[in-house]
């Protein structure tokens, strides 16, 4: 790893290592005690949400520069924080109520205030008065180009749909989604689940770090393909406490399937999406949230895994991802 990062500029290399150290310390510092304690008190498991914000918190802290953005207003940031906080808290309460994860007593609702405040703070840094933080986080609230952001949102669900169609044609078995239904109730479930994934399930909690902070620094020196693989390994390792607890599957084969055969093409594709959408954090957050939520509503199959790999190969070839930017 040192030989690889040795090619980076000294300051970029220090930032990359600092980011990884802070990310792992924050996340594992929350996850490991909670996972050990949850055997005694199951409700502590909900605090796992807090640990997912390690990458984004590290990105914000390391982006700080001692320069104030001209014309920035604290009131704008406070308004953004307040609106995001209320929206995120409503999503978390609705999610807990729909899936009966918490008894929605006053104490249970108050327990969700902390996980609501963290994404609100992260989103509000897009209006930070600090130049460095604002420059890093601003693209989290940049919806243009709209068309390509829609592609980022729909790309992985389309892979699942196509895989399900091919499996049906061949007469194979599909892994049915855990959510079934139709009409208004289904639409509500999709909105709540996507909102949950966006704010605390990988979108806002991870992508400002992995793609918003780390990826640009790696792409300054490496090709998008190499940068993707350099992110893949720490990104997979970062999940280790959850994986040891069985979140990636009950067997080692299931672990390899999740963290290698699925995560590698996902990492390559999300880099392509990020670059194609003008290097906006929002595009990566939309894509990340979609691939976390889509299997809950769309049937999955082994064909979808293969098609994901084919998609990654296609974007590598069409995007010439083996070439560094500017060449």
Image: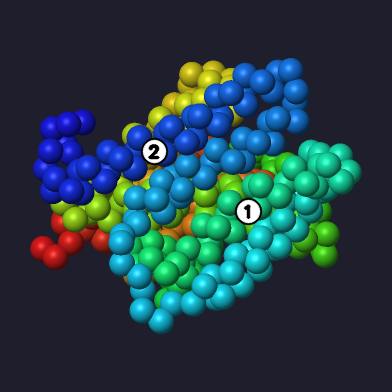
Q: Give the label on residue 117, or none.
A: 1
Q: Quadrant of the N terminus?
A: top left
For this view, does 129 lie left or right of residue 4?
right
Residue 257: give x, y in percent of width and height: 47, 30
Residue at x 57% of width, y 55% of height: 119
Q: Secondary structure at mark 1?
A: helix
Q: What residue occupies the far bottom of the structure in this picture?
A: 71
Q: Residues within 10 Å of mark 1 (few under 14, many from 20)?
A: some
Q: Return the residue nearer the eye: 162 or 97.
A: 97
Q: Return the residue nearer the eye: 200 or 272.
A: 200
Residue at x 51% of width, y 25% of height: 241
Location of residue 100 (image quadrant): top right
Residue that numbered label 2 is attached to: 22
277 is higher (above) or lower (below) than 24: below
Could you tell me how far apart the alpha carbons at marks 2 and 1 are, in whole angstroms?
20 Å
Residue at x 65% of width, y 66% of height: 82
The reply to whether residue 248 is visible in this rendering is no
Q: Return the residue nearer the eye: 262 or 44.
A: 44
Q: Residues within 10 Å of mark 2 (few under 14, many from 20)?
A: some
Residue 57: give x, y in percent of width and height: 46, 48
163 is higher (above) or lower (below) than 236: below
58 is higher (above) or lower (below) than 281: above
Residue 230: give x, y in percent of width and height: 28, 40
Q: What residue occupies the far right of the structure in this picture?
A: 105
């Amino acid at each position: 790893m040192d030989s690889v990062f040795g090619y980076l500029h000294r300051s970029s290399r220090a930032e990359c290592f600092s980011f990884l150290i802070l990310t792992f310390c924050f996340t594992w510092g929350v996850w490991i005690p909670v996972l050990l304690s949850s055997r005694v008190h199951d409700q502590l498991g909900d605090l796992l949400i807090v640990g997912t914000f390690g990458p984004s918190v590290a990105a914000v802290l390391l982006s700080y520069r001692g320069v104030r953005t001209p014309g920035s207003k604290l009131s704008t940031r406070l308004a953004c924080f307040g609106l995001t906080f209320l929206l995120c808290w409503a999503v978390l309460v609705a999610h807990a109520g729909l899936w009966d994860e918490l008894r929605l007593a006053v104490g249970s609702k108050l327990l969700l205030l902390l996980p609501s405040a963290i994404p609100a703070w992260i989103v509000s840094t897009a209006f930070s008065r600090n130049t460095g933080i604002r420059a890093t986080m601003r693209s989290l609230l940049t919806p243009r180009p709209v068309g390509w952001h829609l592609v980022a949102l729909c790309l992985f669900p389309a892979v699942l749909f196509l895989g399900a169609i091919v499996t049906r044609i061949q007469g194979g078995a599909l892994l049915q989604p855990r959510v079934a239904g139709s009409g208004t109730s289904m639409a509500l479930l999709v909105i709540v689940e996507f909102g949950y994934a966006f704010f605390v399930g990988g979108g806002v909690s991870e992508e400002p770090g992995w793609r918003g902070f780390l990826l640009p620094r790696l792409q300054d020196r490496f090709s998008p393909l190499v940068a993707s693989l350099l992110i893949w390994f720490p990104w997979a390792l970062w999940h280790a406490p959850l994986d040891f607890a069985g979140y990636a599957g009950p067997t080692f084969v299931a672990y390899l399937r999740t963290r290698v055969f699925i995560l590698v093409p996902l990492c390559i594709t999300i880099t392509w999406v990020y670059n194609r959408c003008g290097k906006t954090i929002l595009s990566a957050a939309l894509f990340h949230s979609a691939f976390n939520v889509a299997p809950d509503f769309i049937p999955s199959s082994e064909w979808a895994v293969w098609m994901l790999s084919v998609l990654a190969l296609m974007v590598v070839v069409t995007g010439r991802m083996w070439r560094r930017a500017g060449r």
